[in-house]
Each structure stands twice: as structure tokens, then as C-alpha cells.
Image: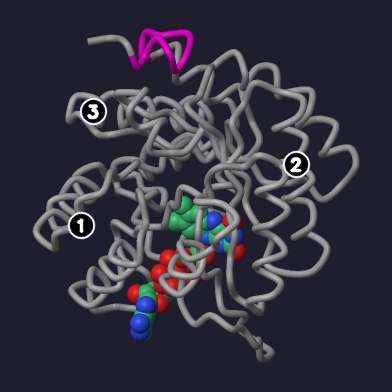
């Protein structure tokens, strides 16, 4: 379903992000978990796009599998770095044929070493390109960074860049993960002041281990880990069960507070784990996203 229709249908959006596993066993485990994700009835799910090479084909394979074999509505991520226009058109054509309606449109990270050639400099250029794609009118999501993006320390300029993606035709924004709701809500207000007036969905990742937190800090550069959260985690760092419980409790409190602030939706960075997301849903008082959407 086109994302604008999904926004009309669902008063609050709940979505899940998966990554295509590298190994055969990871793939099997994810497919076994799919039923648990399906029973949570998300508005849609998204599938990340690898930085390069064969990992990129796996996104299409997982999207195709979800579209054909589950009730989930898959939205592929697509990064333009290292792609020319013809390659992007081929990918868009394949997605149109597979019945995909929406694309999460990104630039991707510039590799530290090595030169990449690309027909697109920034995500805004890819938004413009997808908007002009004649075969299908895809719904378009872009990324937003409540606590800044490492390449653009000037926060005012960064909002200009976000605005350029909106002006190019984005339908909604999915935020980078964050652990500090005040920072997210303040950024939403700044977006509003900048006339960025498309829906913003909050990105939430429950911390389930100290090592996954450290990996995320690396990948989501700029994200702040509040001292209150770190104090709790480090106090129990030798007890993995407690660390997981603290991470899930923190994410649950974040979600509860965001819902109280009437956010337009929550996107869960699931890391392909269904249990943590299920626990959060239950703690919020609902067994499914559909129930959360209809509660007043
Ligand atoms: C929700 C979400 C999903 C993601 N999924 C993936 C994924 O699947 N695969 C993956 O590889 N990465 C993914 N990423 C990471 C993302 O690709 C990187 O953070 C990347 O560095 C920024 O992508 P962007 O689309 O925001 O780029 P852009 O909007 O192009 O911005 C990139 C940087 O360039 C600056 N900029 C923009 N326009 C201009 C301009 N005209 N002049 C000068 N500077 C400019 C911006 O301020 C920013 O600092 C995801 C991030 C998020 C938040």
C-alpha cells in the first residue's frame, strides 16, 4: 500500500526494520521469527540495503520473500552511493514488478577508503530521480537525524538539507535511533519551524547487550546515550539478563512518553530480534500494533 494510504489508515504508525542476514543460518532464523513479527501487525516493515556488493542483492531477495509469503508490507531501503542512474532504474523496475509501493531513500555512508563513483551526490538527488520514475509512483521516505549527522556539524545547515529532501518530494521522515526523547521532540519543533511538515516517525532501538550498544554508537554516530541510562547499564554490565531488561525498560518508557506526545509513529530497529519488540508492545498494554493504533 502506498505510504500516504497507510498514513490515512493508521492514526499511529508502528513499523519494524530488518537487515538481510549474511549467512544461511541467519536467514533461517529470521524467517522462523517472521510469524512473531506478523502477529504484531505492524503498519509496514523495512529492509536495509548493504553498503556494497552481494549484500545488496539480499535486500531484494528478502523484500520479495516478505511480499510473497507473509502479510507484512515490505519497504526496501535504497542507497544511491556507488550507483548510476541505469542501475537505480533497474532496481526500481524490479521493485515495481514485485508490487513494492514504497522506498526508504538514502545516500548511504561514504566509505572511509577508496573512491566511489555515483550519479547522485545526496539523498535529495535520489528522491528527485524516484519522483520522476515513470513506471510507478513510489511512496518516499527519507532519513532524519534528531541529534545531528556527523558530516554536517552546523545544525541549521543540516535542517536545510533535510528540507531539500522534503522539497524534492519525500512523503515522510524516519528518524535515526535516539535514547533521549527531549532531543527528538525539540528536533521535531525545529523541523516545524523550518517548514518541514511531513510526518516524522521516531526510531527506537531497545538495547539488548553492551556490545550491541557499542556497535550502534559506531553506526549511528552522533546519537547520545544519556548518563542515567549508562549508569543503569554499567551497574549491571556483568549480568546480560539485567542489561537486556534495563534496555527494554528504557525503550518502553521512551515509547510510552512518545505516544503521550502524540508522535505520528514509532519505527523499531529490531536487529532481527522479535522478542524485545514483543515485550515492549506488551508493556505498553497491547499485544499488537493494531491495538496500539486504536487505543485512545
Ligand atoms: C532511518 C535510517 C535508515 C538507514 N538505512 C540505511 C541502509 O539501509 N543502508 C545504509 O548504507 N545506510 C543506512 N542509513 C545510514 C545513512 O545512509 C547514513 O547516515 C548516511 O550518511 C546519510 O544518509 P542520508 O540519506 O541522510 O544522506 P543525505 O541526506 O544525502 O545527507 C548526507 C550528509 O550530507 C549532507 N548534505 C545533504 N545535502 C547536502 C548538500 N547539498 N551539500 C552539502 N551537504 C549536504 C547532510 O547534511 C548529511 O550530513 C540509514 C539511516 C537512517 C536514519
Query: Whole-percent x and y of residue 92?
Result: 65, 58
Look at discs 1 and 3 and give the one toward the viewer: 1
Q: Distance of mark 2 from mark 3, alpha carbons?
A: 33 Å
**Residue 29 magenta:** no
Decide if residue 169 is in sight here: yes
Q: Spatial distance from mark 1 to mark 3, Cα to Cα?
A: 23 Å
Dot 2: what SS?
helix
Residue 196 is labelled as 1
Question: Is the shortest distance between ligand 1 and the CB of mark 3 under 8 Å?
Answer: no
* Residue occupying the point 30% across, 73% down: 161
Q: Position of residue 55 (x, y in %)?
A: 78, 59
Q: Residue at x 19, y 24 (%)?
A: 260
Which residue in the protein does label 2 denote? 62
Q: Residue furthest front?
A: 134
Decide which of 131, 76 is in the foreground and name it. Answer: 131
- In this rendering, does residue 219 appear at all? no
x 28%, y 34%: residue: 264
- Please identify the quarter of the rendering in which residue 253 is found: top left
Give the class, few, some or many, for how many residues have Cα within 10 Å of label 2's Cα (few <14, many ≥20). Answer: many
Front residue of 235/16: it is 16
Q: Is residue 285 magenta?
A: yes
In the image, which residues are magenta? 284-293
| Disc 3 packing (10 Å; few <14; some 14–19; many ≥20) | few
Please report whichever mark, 1 or 2, sits nearer to the chain's N-terminal start: 2
Residues packed near mark 1 inside 10 Å, few (<14), some (14 to 19) or many (20 plus):
many
Where residue 128 sits: x, y (%)?
43, 69
Residue 162 location, quadrant: bottom left
Amino acid at each position: 500500500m502506498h505510504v500516504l494510504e497507510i498514513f490515512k489508515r493508521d492514526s499511529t504508525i508502528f513499523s519494524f526494520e530488518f537487515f538481510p542476514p549474511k549467512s544461511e543460518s541467519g536467514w533461517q532464523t529470521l524467517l522462523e521469527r517472521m510469524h512473531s513479527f506478523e502477529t504484531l501487525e505492524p503498519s509496514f516493515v523495512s529492509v536495509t540495503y548493504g553498503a556494497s556488493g552481494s549484500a545488496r542483492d539480499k535486500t531484494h531477495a528478502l523484500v520479495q520473500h516478505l511480499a510473497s509469503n507473509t502479510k507484512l508490507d515490505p519497504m526496501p531501503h535504497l542507497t544511491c552511493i556507488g550507483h548510476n542512474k541505469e542501475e537505480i532504474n533497474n532496481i526500481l523496475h524490479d521493485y515495481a514488478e514485485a508490487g513494492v509501493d514504497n522506498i526508504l531513500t538514502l545516500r548511504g555512508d561514504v566509505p572511509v577508503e577508496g573512491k566511489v563513483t555515483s550519479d547522485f551526490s545526496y539523498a535529495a538527488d535520489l528522491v528527485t530521480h524516484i519522483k520522476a520514475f515513470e513506471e510507478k509512483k513510489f511512496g518516499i521516505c527519507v532519513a532524519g537525524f534528531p541529534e545531528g549527522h556527523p558530516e554536517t556539524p552546523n545544525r541549521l545547515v543540516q535542517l536545510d538539507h533535510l528540507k531539500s529532501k522534503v522539497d524534492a518530494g519525500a512523503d515522510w521522515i524516519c528518524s535515526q535511533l535516539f535514547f533521549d526523547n527531549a532531543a527528538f521532540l525539540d528536533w521535531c519543533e525545529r523541523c516545524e519551524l523550518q517548514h518541514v511538515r511531513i510526518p516524522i516517525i521516531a526510531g527506537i532501538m531497545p538495547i539488548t547487550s553492551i556490545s550491541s550498544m557499542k556497535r550502534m554508537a559506531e553506526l549511528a554516530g552522533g546519537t547520545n546515550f544519556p548518563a542515567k541510562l549508562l549508569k543503569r547499564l554499567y551497574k549491571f554490565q556483568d549480568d546480560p539478563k539485567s542489561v537486556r531488561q534495563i534496555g527494554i525498560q528504557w525503550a518502553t518508557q521512551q515509547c510510552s512518553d512518545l505516544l503521550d506526545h502524540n508522535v505520528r509513529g514509532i519505527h523499531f530497529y529490531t536487529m532481527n530480534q522479535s522478542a524485545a519488540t514483543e515485550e515492549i508492545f506488551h508493556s505498553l498494554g497491547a499485544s499488537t500494533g493494531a491495538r496500539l493504533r486504536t487505543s485512545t
